[in-house]
Every structure is written in structure tokens, then in C-alpha cells.
Amino acid sequence: LNALLAAGDLHAGILEGKVRAREEEADRLVWRYSIAKGAAVALNPVPVADLAGGVAVDVAMILALSRVYGIPLTRPAAVRLVRDMTFALGATGLVHYATRLIGSGVKASLAGATVMSGGLAAPLTALGYGAIGLTQAVAGATASYVIGHAAGTYLRQGGQWGDKGLKTVVQELLAQAKADSIVDRLRDELKSQVKP
């Protein structure tokens, strides 16, 4: 009986270690993809291309997370998850995309001003491009961070949102990201990665 109890405790400990290792790997994965998306958005000079690239990064992140959690997902299913979670971000999601669209237009205009002025506007362009790029990067990285952790919740629960539902899960993660200074961490990390 003691041997069975000890074996049960050992088994529970092994399972707990596996779950913890899986969660740590998922957290690292979400962070890496969030930073990659933020850097790509900041450095992309082509208007609207950063939106398509951002969706592609989020889809790739969800597919990688599905492998970590052992829940097979197809690319179309991952695209639907990104779409649904973006809608669940609600006003925050709309502001995120509006900020990126407007920022892309301004970055393109600044680049055009440099060309039109024969390079005289280059210092102003670089300053504006950097500020706008960083703002876009933080918005993109934060959205990716929330989408990644929401997808993790979905996958951890066997491909279901549970009692709370998608919108509640996403809103809680967004509130947690703001409260935990995730945005500040993302901004600092992106500043170090995107230095001209």
C-alpha cells in the first residue's frame, strides 16, 4: 500500500513537472513571437504590409503553441482563432489596427518627405519614424502577447474556452498585461531591439 501511495505521489509530481515545463515553454514562445511581431511592425516601411505580417506571426505562434500543448491545429483553424481573438479585443483591437494603419501612412509620408526634400528631412524623418514605429511595435507586441496567452488558455483546456468564454478570457489577459507592466517590458525590449 505504501509503495502504491509513493508511486501515486511520484506520478503526480511528474505530471506537475510536465505541466510546469509546458507552461514555461509556452510563455517563452509567446514572448519571442510578441517581440518578433513588434520589431517587424516597427521596421516595416510598407503601409498595410505590417498588418498582414502581424497576422502571419500570430498564426505561426498559435501553431507553435498547439505543438507545445499537443493539440493539433490546422492553419485555417489558427487563422480563425486569431480573427476571433482580435474581435474579442473589442475596442482595444480596433485601436490597435487603427494605430497601425495611421502609423503606416505617416511612416510612408515621412519617407516620401525625405525623398522629396533630397534628404534634407532625413533627421526629422528618422525621429518621427522611430517614435511611430515604437508605438506601432508596442501595440502589435501587446496584441500578440494577449492573443498568445489566450490561445494558450484555449489549448490548455483541450480546444475550448470554458465557462468564461473567449471575450472574458481575452479581456482578463489584457487587464493583466496592463497591470503587470507587460507593456513596459515589451517597450523596453523593443527599444533595445529596434535601435537604429
Image (spheres, helix red, strand yellow):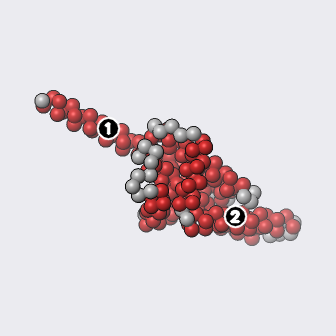
The quadrant of the image that shows the N terminus is top left
Upstream in sequence: badge 1 or badge 2? 1
Residue 11 place in picture, x, y as percent:
26, 34
Q: Residue at x 72, y 63 (%)?
A: 104
Left or right position of 103 against 25: right
Residue 164, by quadrant, is bottom left
User: Is residue 36 visible in this depiction of the protein?
Assistant: no
Mark 1 touching mark 2, by CB under 8 A?
Answer: no
Q: Residue at x 61, y 65 (%)?
A: 94
User: Is residue 111 visible in this depiction of the protein?
Assistant: yes
The correct choice, above or below, for 53 with respect to 90 in the image is above
The disc at residue 15 is 1
Left or right position of 182 against 110: left
Secondary element type, mark 2: helix
Residue 84, by quadrant, is bottom right
Residue 128, by quadrant, is bottom right
The correct choice, above or below, for 85 with respect to 127 in the image is above
The disc at residue 33 is none
The correct choice, above or below, for 127 with respect to 155 in the image is below
Secondary element type, mark 1: helix
Residue 105 place in picture, x, y as percent:
74, 65
Q: Residues within 10 Å of mark 2 (few under 14, many from 20)?
A: some
Taking depth in this image into account, of 144 and 163 the one nearest to the observer is: 163
Residue 28 place in picture, x, y as percent:
47, 47
Q: Residues within 10 Å of mark 1 (few under 14, many from 20)?
A: few
Which residue carries the number 2 mark?
Answer: 101
Q: What is the total number of numbered labels drawn onto the structure image?
A: 2
Taking depth in this image into account, of 80 and 182 the one nearest to the observer is: 80
